[in-house]
Amino acid sequence: MNATVQPAPTVTLLNGVAMPQLGLGTWPMDDTQAARAVASALDLGYRLIDTAENYRNEAGVGAGIRQSGVSRDQIFVTTKFNREWHSVDGVKQACEASLSRLGVDYIDLLLIHWPNPAQDRYVDAFHGLTRLLESGVVRAIGTSNFKVTHLQRLLDQGLVPHVNQIQLDPYHLRDDVVALHNAHGIVTETWSPLGRGGEMLADPAITAVAERHGRTPAQVVLRWQTQSGYVPAPKSSDPTRQAQNLNVFDFELSADEMAALNALNRPDPKMMDADVFGH
Ligand code: A2P
């Protein structure tokens, strides 16, 4: 049996809903991998699971939820839909399809996966989300990969996402988007918060802090994320790493250590641009 870790604290969304401050990312797991990883994470103490229509693993996520010993009302399930559903009625259909694949009767947080500005229908999609929120089939609504111009267009019409989930890590600070979130009470959720487990975790600025605290580089990065007020969703299929990644709420980085990680920001020409990329 897995040793459980202290659950993550929660952040409060604009509509009062409590969202766990750290969750399990599930891209690029298939159904079988997702079922195993989700069951293991929930048994360890995770209470937020992040999936998407586009990951093609919602059925596996649902199976993992049922395999775990954790009741549905203790779990915060997030999913996202693709651009073909960017209309009021389309979002309703996308939600029904996700509910069916997941095998649940409500979704905690439903997100527009990419803005797809060339298609120019994300405002309609957001109106669809507000209808679902009113009906109670989703508890919170939001966006993913929205840049400042996309969010501003919603905000100008009085439409405020509860959450915007973006790529953000010490190499990708996203200051402009985060400032807009903070000005409007939008929670910043982060994907690939560990920089996809790549070279960033070997950065000497990060390993030095890790050694000082007797923690792993991944734990330092996730502590930096949560201490900055973000909600990271690191992906790991490995129960030992899952436990390590959740176990970041019992130590603190100093202001100097936070500044050292904030100084790592750099341009990334390979970063996906939501004005161009989307599905
Ligand atoms: P694995 O699933 O084998 O643990 P991100 O969430 O930033 O996209 O990062 C995911 C990648 O980082 C995966 O390849 C994952 O591999 C790896 N990873 C997850 N947790 C850790 C950890 N604690 N230490 C090192 N690598 C990790």
Image (cartoon, rainbow, N blue to C red):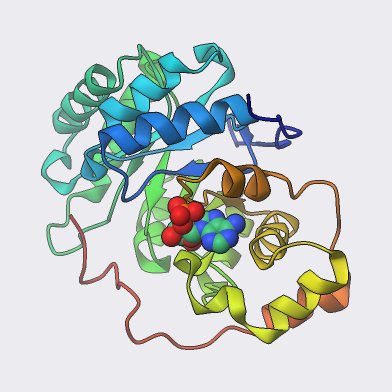
Q: Would you place residue 5 above or below residue 235 in this image?
A: above
In front of the other: 186 or 75: 75
- Horizontal arrangement in the rendering, residue 237 relative to residue 225 (left or right): left
Residue drawn where x is 39% and y is 66% of the image: 147
Q: Residue furthest front?
A: 1
Q: Would you place residue 201 above or below residue 131 in this image?
A: below
Q: Would you place residue 222 above or below residue 109 in this image?
A: below
Residue drawn where x is 63% and y is 84% of the image: 264
Query: Is residue 83 something one can see in this rendering?
Result: yes
In front of the other: 239 or 102: 239
Query: Is residue 192 something one can see in this rendering?
Result: no
The x and y percentages for residue 84 are: 11, 44
- Image-quadrant location for residue 43: top right
Quarter in which the C terminus is drawn: bottom left
Residue drawn where x is 34% and y is 20% of the image: 63
The x and y percentages for residue 262 are: 68, 78
The x and y percentages for residue 254 are: 88, 69
Q: Would you place residue 261 above or below residue 73 in this image?
A: below
Residue drawn where x is 70% and y is 54% of the image: 226
